[in-house]
Image: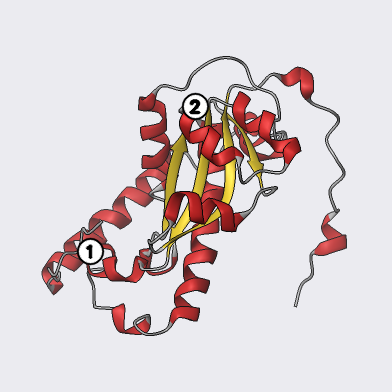
Amino acid sequence: MSVTSTNQLNEAELIKMRSQAQERVRALRERKPILDKDSIDLILRDARSHYAWQDKTIPKEILTELYEIVANGATSMNCCPARFFFVTSKEGKDRLATSLKEKNIDKMRAAPVTVIIAYDLEFWQQLPFLFPHEDRRPLFEGKPEYCERTAFLNGTLQGAYLMIAARALGLDVGAMSGFSNEIVDQEFFAGTSLRSNFLCNLGYADESALFQKLPRFAFDDVCSFI
């Protein structure tokens, strides 16, 4: 994939775009200074990881909207290293099943969509398009460990955006780490610069499989002022 642009913004364009962006943020904050309690409960506080699913498909339009929301989440230097593979076909799920721990296979097959959240080690080649202010490619070129760390950290962040955005759109989620990254990479990404991070089932949950929410640490247990 290549969407590289060599166009650099001039100072007048930057000033205009910055001013417009600032006004949009101020206007949004004025319209919606804070989410209501139910909205916060839906996306995080009372949200749950789901393991059972209704037999109900997710329209492509919702998945497209989901990505469009996720794409706007912040990443360092707007590097956007995550790549999302929506596994919906029987063939795709058969291939994915070879990587899963046995207890996760039925969960994956029952979900309408299983997303492979991956990251591209060559994300930095797209920085002229993603970060047109200046050419940041020299920061990454010839530095594979730095590329790996940047791609993994920011790709994980984008995976979290996907989970929260899915809940905001009325979907339920069930992230999974019980699989072999090596098998997924060989099966789906052999010969490419892509690497798998984690999996996430998407769909409309069957809540009858839920149990009570597990404990969380209190503020004073894990938070400090320095």
Quarter of the picture holding the C terminus? bottom right
Give above or below for 192 relative to 30: below
Residue 131 pos. (x, y %): 28, 68
Residue drawn 41% across the image and 32% down it: 63
Residue drawn 73% across the image and 20% down it: 207
Q: Is residue 73 left or right of residue 4?
A: right
Residue drawn 42% across the image and 84% down it: 143
Q: Amino acid at mark 2?
A: Lys
What residue is shown with label 1? 129
Residue 89 pos. (x, y %): 45, 28
What residue is shown with label 2? 90
Local crowd size for mark 2, using a 10 Å CA cut-off: few (<14), some (14–19), many (≥20): few
Q: Amino acid at mark 1?
A: Phe
- Lower position in the chain sequence, tag 2 or tag 1: 2
Residue drawn 49% across the image and 58% down it: 155
Proximity of marks 2 and 1: CB atoms separated by less than 8 Å:
no
Q: CA distance from mark 2 to mark 1?
A: 36 Å
Q: Quadrant of residue 122?
A: bottom left
SS at circle 1? helix
Q: Quadrant of residue 35?
A: top right
Which color scheme is applied?
secondary structure
User: Can you name the residue that lies furthest to the top here?
Assistant: 55
Query: Could you tell me if residue 141 is visible in this image?
Result: yes
Residue 172 pos. (x, y %): 60, 29
Give above or below for 117 relative to 133: above
Foreground residue among 112 and 138: 112
